[in-house]
């Protein structure tokens, strides 16, 4: 026995993964609440026979409602439902490969110092590729940062951060990220999940991602802009050093804020200036 089933699609026929079906009875009581799978399919538990209201919602799309009939066997089908994008939805970049432009991108890590101030470290060597999919949830990201390319503006501190006390760049020269999932939260906001490799440790993290749009650049190419943020705990990556631990004060805080401003160029290669 199955319950209410069907497919949720865009006007172009793409599955809307993570769309939500909410079913209420004629008295307005919720009887089912399920999310779509990667194919846009939804299926509830068997329901008592009768007439119900099925409401379909998804971030970035206009909600829709349909009447659903459940038969004596507890099952029913609404077939295929098409959701329209909201009027103010941001136009997504064209599908295909996009290369991260290190000249117009930045990665900044901010940590508390002595509990009273902040240290900002910029990583100046970044590379990577973004593959935009359709639907957008099928997109993927791969990026690398050279750990030694850390710059806080003070050479002595930078050398210490490169040492085995912190990043240990000789043993672990590359910081890498490989995405595993992209979930839409709003018309231009997403959650990007993936695996971060840092200091020889691998951890699953989530980035709060905001899409800034795309358009032509002065060099004949097309660019897309993104801003992402994440909170990391250095202890998760076996970076446990504290120069002032005996005094009961952590020289550098355990929580690190990461901010990324990314420009990506459409195509398989970066322009040559």
Image: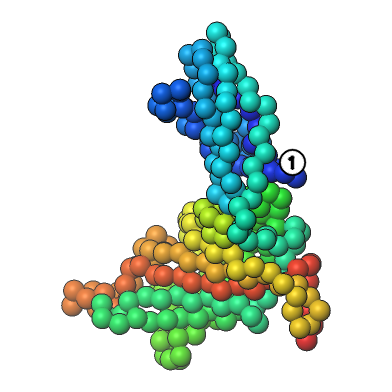
Circle 1 SS class: loop
Position above or below: 65 against 108: above
Figure coloring = rainbow
Q: Which image quadrant: the C terminus?
A: bottom right
User: 21 or 63: which is nearer to us?
Assistant: 63
User: 77 or 143: which is nearer to us?
Assistant: 77
Q: Is residue 153 left or right of residue 62?
A: left
Is residue 168 in view? Answer: no
How far across and down, in percent of the image, does residue 50 sit? 51, 15
Circle 1 sits on which residue? 13
Q: Quadrant of residue 234?
A: bottom left
Residue at horizontal 49 percent and vertical 28 percent from the top: 23
Is residue 65 in view? Answer: yes
Q: Is residue 79 left or right of residue 166?
A: right
How far across and down, in percent of the image, does residue 33 sit? 47, 31
Residue at horizontal 26 percent and vertical 81 percent from the top: 116
Residue at horizontal 46 percent and vertical 27 percent from the top: 24
How far across and down, in percent of the image, does residue 141 sit? 64, 60
Q: Count the marks: how many?
A: 1
């Amino acid at each position: 026995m199955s319950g209410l089933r069907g497919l949720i699609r865009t006007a172009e026929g793409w599955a809307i993964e993570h769309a939500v079906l909410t079913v209420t009875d004629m008295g307005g009581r919720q009887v089912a609440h399920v999310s779509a799978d990667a194919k846009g399919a939804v299926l509830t538990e068997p329901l008592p026979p009768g007439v119900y209201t099925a409401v379909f919602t998804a971030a970035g799309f206009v909600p829709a409602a349909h009447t659903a009939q459940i038969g004596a066997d507890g099952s029913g089908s609404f077939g295929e439902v098409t959701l329209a994008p909201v009027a103010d939805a941001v136009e997504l970049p064209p599908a295909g490969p996009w290369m991260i432009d290190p000249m117009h991108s930045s990665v900044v890590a901010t940590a508390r110092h002595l509990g009273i101030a902040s240290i900002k470290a910029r990583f100046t060597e970044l590379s990577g590729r973004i593959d935009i999919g359709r639907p957008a949830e099928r997109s993927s990201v791969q990026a690398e940062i050279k750990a030694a390319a850390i710059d806080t503006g003070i050479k002595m501190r930078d050398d210490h951060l490169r040492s085995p006390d912190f990043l240990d760049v000789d043993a672990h020269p590359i910081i890498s990220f490989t995405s595993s999932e992209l979930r839409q939260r709003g018309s231009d906001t997403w959650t990007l999940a993936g695996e971060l490799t840092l200091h020889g440790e691998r951890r699953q993290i989530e980035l709060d991602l905001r899409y800034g749009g795309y358009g032509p650049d002065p060099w004949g190419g097309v660019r897309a802009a993104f801003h992402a943020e994440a909170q990391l705990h250095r202890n998760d990556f076996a970076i446990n050093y504290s120069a002032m631990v005996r005094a009961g004060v952590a020289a550098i805080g355990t929580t690190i804020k990461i901010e990324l401003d990314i420009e990506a160029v459409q195509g398989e290669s970066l322009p040559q200036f």
